[in-house]
Amino acid sequence: MVNLQQVSKSFGKLEVLKGLNATFEEGKITAVVGPNASGKTTLMKSILGLVLADDGQIQIDGETAFHNPLSRSKIGYMPQKAQFPDNLKPIELLNWVQDLRDEKSPRLHALIDYFQLTPHLDKPLRVLSGGTRQKVSAVLTFLFDPPVLILDEPSAGLDPVASSRLKDKILEEKRRGKVIILTSHVMSELEELADEVLFLLEGKIVFKGSLDEIRKRTGEPRLERAIAKFMEGRGL
Amino acid sequence: MILSHNQASLQSTKKRRSTVKSALKVMKYGFFDLLRSRWIIIYTLFYLVVTSGLLYFGGDANQAVLSTLNLVLLVVPLISLVLGLSYFYYTRDFIELILTQPIGRSSVFLGHFAGLALPLVAAFLLGSGLPFLLAGVRQGADWRVIASLMVAGTLVSLIFSALAFWIGLVNEERVKALGLALAVWLGLTMIYDGLLLLFSILMQAYPIERSLIILSLFNPIDLSRILVLLQLDTAALMGYTGAVFQRFFGSYLGILISLGSLILWTALPIYFGLRSFKKKNF
């Protein structure tokens, strides 16, 4: 379980998160949505400890995430655009991360197969396409079977095959009881994956509930329209 | 009480050990990634060619040490700053990736810094040290002189790559950071000496030895020059601060003080870098 209490963060004078309270539960996929610059990425990065919150508490399974490297062993993170060292090969990268964590993953080969990475394992990462790198990032995210998954636009840049495989994987992990937090601009993806939507507007949570609730409150049957209405501040 | 105290100290020892272990693992990656990039090889070859050339054409090995020294004091800071900054920005996203793993920030910073600084030092030692080892000793150079040159080059590499990391950490904009790095380089290699000279000319009627010594402590380049020149017994070659240094402290204490200050100079930017790294939002 991921628990946020009164989490605030400012960059200089700009208040990005304004006292957020939220709980993300096991076996549920929560989509964080909101207009650009509403604090989605800052929220995710605060849970990861990449951004250090100014105030409030973030707890993962009851342990603080603030300056606590151990809490990160519980999180798998897939960034929007994965950046890797140019000169390494995917297999070297994966082995290096395992070495870094002092942890061998029994899932490695199954995941490489699943994301069809085998033909690319021995090429330097710099020559790989954006989509292939994204697959490497996916393998890394699921590698250590973490109880919490944070996915920032996970299917961006993936071809339809890889994208559906990734979505299947996400749903499978949900069934296995993971806490899953994701963002996406693709509405069909949200409809397919999300159990719950957390709506951020100017650093505040203005809504947290199911997709049906959003539709009901805005009176729009189509999710995209409903969310757009929300973003414009109507239907709150 | 005693037991719990022991346990606490055991835990902190364990924690420290795992910090070092993780730092070494972070370093290992940087080391190999950098060794595979062309820059570090070009840098090594540059030194290999220049130092061999100086030794071959210069005749006297001590003369070659002096020429190499001037080159070291000019080129090593520049390369360390520029390579340090580009390496910092180039690996920035990757640092984010490491920080999403269960590794503490101190380990990441120290390991990452070592992963840059050690190849730089290795390139310098190999490129510049090897020719001296092969030809210089045969030509009758004093091993102490060569050793001090190697120490100076090593410390200058460490100091300026640490400065580069620190500059990179506090500046999001690359262009601004690069401008700042070049300003630091110009300031410490050229402008500082010019001002020092101006100061000593203007104040020549007064006893300014003490202030000159103190002023030279604030410039790692001056300190490195003094460290090497103090090994040579040719006071005339020493430049003003070097001569003052030797007269004031004598060779032995002079070496100790310049070396000590240089080590302090190395520690400070690493410390400040670590401090900003721990507070940084990625």
Image: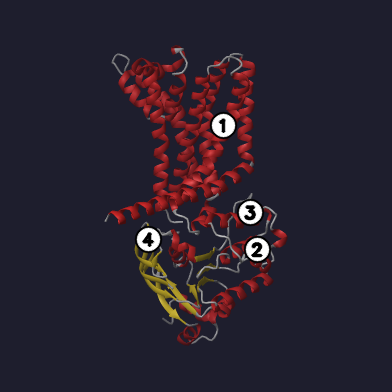
* Nearer the camera: disc 2 or disc 1: 1
Judge by depth and name the residue closer to the eye, B81 or B55: B55
Picture layout, residue B39 above or below residue B244: below
Mark 2 crowdedness (10 Å alpha carbons): few <14, some 14-19, many ≥20: some
**Mark 4 to mark 3: distance in Å?**
38 Å
Chain letter of the residue beneath label 1 in the structure image: B
Q: Chain of mark 3?
A: A
The numbered mark at residue B124 is 1
List the residue tagged with mark 3. Answer: A92
The N terminus of chain A - image quarter? bottom left
Whichever of callouts 2 and 4 sits on the residue coming sooner in the sequence is 4
Tell me the residue at 41%/75% (across/down): A23
In the image, taking residue A67 as reference, residue B137 lies left or right, namely: right
Seen from this angle, which residue lies furthest front? B3
Q: Secondary structure at mark 2?
A: helix
Residue of label 2: A131
Q: Nearer the viewer, mark 3 or mark 1?
A: 3
N-terminal-most mark, 4 or 3: 4
Q: Chain of mark 4?
A: A
Image depth: mark 1 or mark 4 in front: 1
Residue found 59% across the figure and 31% down from its top: B126
Q: Is residue B124 positioned above or below A148 on the image? A: above
